[in-house]
Image (tube, rainbow, N blue to C red):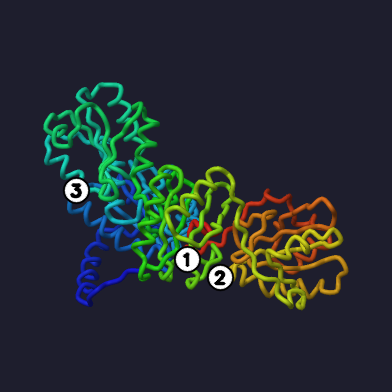
Amino acid sequence: MWKFLLICTLVVAARAEVGEEEDVLVLKKSNFDEALQTHPNILVEFYAPWCGHCKALGPEFAKAAGVLKAEGSAVRLGKVDATEETELAQEYGVRGYPTIKYFKGGEKASPKEYSAGRQADDIVAWLKKRTGPAVVTLTTVSEAEALIADNEVAVIGFFKDADSTGAKDYEKAAETTDDIPFAVTSDDAIFSKFEVSKDGVVLFKKFDEGRNTFDGELTKENLLAFVKTNQLPLVIEFTEQTAPKIFGGEIKSHILMFLPKTASDFQDKMDQFKKAAEGFKGQILYIFIDSDVDDNQRILEFFGLKKEECPAIRLITLEDEMTKYKPQSDAITSEAIISFCKQFIDGKLKPHLMSQDIPEDWDKNPVKILVGKNFEEIAFNPSKNVFVEFYAPWCGHCKQLTPIWEKLGEKFVDSADIIVAKMDSTANEIDSVKVHSFPTLKFFPAGEDRTVIDYNGERTLEGFTKFLESGGKDGGAPAGDDDDDEDLDPENSCCYTVTAA
């Protein structure tokens, strides 16, 4: 993920990181409480040494610690190896890596979840917002220019009267926004410099239009909506650093363009995509994914795509159930994309469900192979009791289960009414069953009422056998009542996959 142009750059960076790493506290169960008392404001990363996301964050986390130290800040950064310090990890609910929490005032009970990006600037800005005033007062043009120059996005409130209702609502909005600096000014020279003639709010950014002026009734809610709509580029590239901003925002409808940066017509397609985005700000987030990047291959797989099939467009909603949509046309033009998005907003699109072709030998082995195209016929056969494992080929838990599942298939291979089956849920989707984690085990008992029962018992041959012989009563629960155990694969996971990021 980290690319260096020259060997000497690598050496310099490595040397710099050594110094910066020294600025990050190494925390363990034995010194954790003492550290919180010694450093009342501390941001702690719970990591795993093998986690790719943690490796990517490491240099940025260390750089942020160095910046704060150089500025004389009392805020410290610390790290906990959650694979070694399992008690600490369990105490603070660490279920994925990295997990980052902010401890203030030495309090252990309820640390705040870190909610910004994973670059050093994001970390520093977030911490300054948490420890400093919600709104900085600007008294000179140079201060305003420095604020804008030093930040990707900055918001300035122009108010002649700091006690006005608008100014008070502006401050309330600032208090609830962690990742963007807010400032306020009443200085005539600053008003003049930025061509502001009356009280108002301006968002300054280093992309797209460069600035956005708030226009509407000045309330906290309206201001927050204004900032969230304009703080991201019209088109944002999916990377390790931008992922928290993409998934942490309130816009849950995302349109993705899969395209290699090396393509000869890359800029033309990007221009078309960006043009289409202009009419959907605040409604649909436009995201570009470089289909040549190895780390993005899991995302392509999730959408049923291969590198050679790109460029391609897909749309997904990240609500309670993730739903995917595929345009009828492969054309990447602003007109085609706009039409696709309008159909989505108008509710005229049908979800796109992936399916592999039915294998010729799908029923050859004791464990039957199901795909999207034969699932309904087999799983809801009214004369059969069907036990299905929904798996992912890369899932460690699934691999551990495989020999047991095969033995279960062999045990019931001669049964007249029991079928043991499996389905690759990374390549097949069905409308009647939503899979949120791997492996997911569901039982479809014989009958006409299309009942679905989740298996919650022990993942042993004996447990599965009792479950089947009891007709799904011993170890089962109504579908949806179980607490899915996620196969945490933090090194490769992404919010566009069913594994939690």
Q: Which residue is mark 2?
A: 394
Separation (CA) of disc 1 from disc 2: 10 Å
Disc sitting over residue 140 in the figure? none
- Residue 88, percent across and down? 45, 55
Query: In the rendered view of the protein, which quadrant contains the N terminus?
Result: bottom left
Q: Secondary structure at mark 2?
A: loop
- Residue 391, percent across and down? 63, 66
Q: Residue at x 53, y 67 (%)?
A: 305
The type of residue carrying mark 2 is: Trp
Q: Is residue 7 above or below residue 156?
A: below
Separation (CA) of disc 3 from disc 1: 35 Å
The reply to whether discs 1 and 2 touch (Cβ–Cβ < 8 Å) is: yes
Q: Which residue is mark 1?
A: 492
The crowding category of the residue bearing disc 3, from other C-alpha atoms within 10 Å (few below 14, some 14 to 19, many at least 20), is: some
Q: Of 403 and 199, which appears nearest the observer?
A: 199
The type of residue carrying mark 1 is: Asn
Q: Residue at x 48, y 73 (%)?
A: 308
Q: Is residue 136 above or below residue 271?
A: above
Whichever of callouts 1 and 2 sits on the residue coming sooner in the sequence is 2
Front tag of 3 and 1: 3
- Residue 195 as seen in the image, left or right of residue 266: left
Q: Which residue is mark 3?
A: 149
Separation (CA) of disc 2 from disc 3: 44 Å
Whichever of callouts 3 and 1 sits on the residue coming sooner in the sequence is 3
